[in-house]
Image (tube, rainbow, N blue to C red):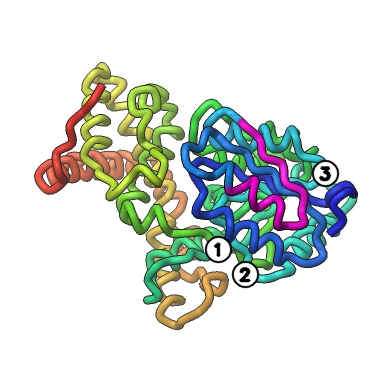
Amino acid sequence: MHVNRKPDLSIIVPLLNEAAELQILFETLAAQKDACFELLLCDGGSSDATRNIAAELEKRYPFPLHLLDTPPGRGCQMNAGAAAARADMLLFLHADSRFTAPDALATALHHMANLPENTRHPVAARFRLRFRRRESTPSVAYYFYEAKAQLDRVDCVRGDQGFLLSRSDFELAGRFDDTLPFLEDIRLAASISRQGKWMLLPAEITSSARRFEAEGLLRRQIVNAIIVNAVVVEWTAFFRELPGLYRCHSDTGKLLLFPLLDGIRTLLADFPPYRRLSFWQSTGRHVAANSWQIFFWLDVRNAFQKSLPPGAVQLLWTNRFNRYLSSGFCSPPVASVVAAAVWIWHRGMLLFCRHLEPRIIKTS
């Protein structure tokens, strides 16, 4: 790799207490062939040995490394990395990302270089996602999310797939939204989709399932769904009052749902009746619009039982839903029924978690 030449690719990685991940990250990047890149590590205030380890690794690997001090929050960190990057192509990665093929970057750059020259709208690409788990037993739940990440739907694009796009398209899409300390990937994905399109690259990228395994996959997905719903219904007070939702994984154990569910109950209790009704109606519309995932689960289960790779899921049930049921699920009567069901679910889960989860001492 030619250290002094302008790189073809700037790899931007936000860090916060990622000392345990850096060695393998450097190894997986050093194994990439035929790709001239620089690595920008954007540290948001690590309190472990992240910075010291990065400085030591810089001496042992051939690619240029830039270690930046940035404000906390992935959006801020990655925007700072993009501003300091030298290449025209940007790749935003997580610290626990790994490539399974040594030509993953070269192939990705080749695909981007062969886009039609008259493309006037932003084009971004992401890799095929697989999870690295402690357990080797196949899991239909993780398989579901791996298959979902390959769908041609913007609401299925996530940052742990890696975001590859040109600097100009990144600026055109408005960069990462740093007004919240999370969901920056979803917001950028939506902005790119509104103006242009997403591509799925042939190479795979693996991501650690450490957070799901530590906190519980179902519990983490419930929290993620609640957060996304709060964004969709534009419930800004939710984020002001509950700032600890996305705690650093090194400080969390098993995820407890009761504080979140009870916080929602408390916040909604302060709403006038018409605002509470509006919230649940908006929530019902959002959940009803995502009912396609129930049918996608049926397709995923069939593919999983046949031991097919995640990209080979046949969308038989999903296509039937889109053809015959999608418009009905978007109707106001169905949305109202779904809103009532979600309200009942919230109350039931609140009671369930109150009795079964350990009590938490609230601190101000």
Residue that carries the numbered disc 3 in the rendered image: 88
Residue that carries the numbered disc 2 in the rendered image: 100
Dividing the picture into quadrants, the one containing residue 173 is top right
- Residue 197 visible in the displayed image: no
- Say which residue appears at 51% left-offset and 69% top-offset: 315
Q: Helix, strand or loop at disc 1? A: strand
- Say which residue appears at 39% left-offset and 38% top-offset: 247
Contact (Cβ within 8 Å) of mark 1 with mark 2: yes
Q: Earlier in the sequence, mark 1 or mark 3?
A: 3
In the picture, measured across the screen, residue 207 lies left or right of residue 257, that is: right
219 up-or-down from 259: above or below: below
Give the magenta part as a residue range. 53-69
270 up-or-down from 64: above or below: above
Percent coordinates x, y for residue 114 in the rendering? 85, 59
Q: Nearer the viewer, residue 278 or 132?
A: 132
Q: Nearer the viewer, residue 97 or 64?
A: 64
Q: CA distance from mark 1 to mark 3?
A: 25 Å
Which quarter shows the N terminus? Answer: bottom right
In the picture, measured across the screen, residue 135 lies left or right of residue 54, that is: left
Q: Earlier in the sequence, mark 3 or mark 2?
A: 3
Dividing the picture into quadrants, the one containing residue 204 is bottom right
Three-letter amino acid code of the residue under disc 2: Thr
- Say which residue appears at 42% left-offset and 31% top-offset: 233
Residue 58 within the segment the image draws in magenta: yes
Number of callouts: 3
Dividing the picture into quadrants, the one containing residue 295 is bottom left
Percent coordinates x, y for residue 285 in the rendering? 39, 39
Q: Residue furthest left?
A: 355
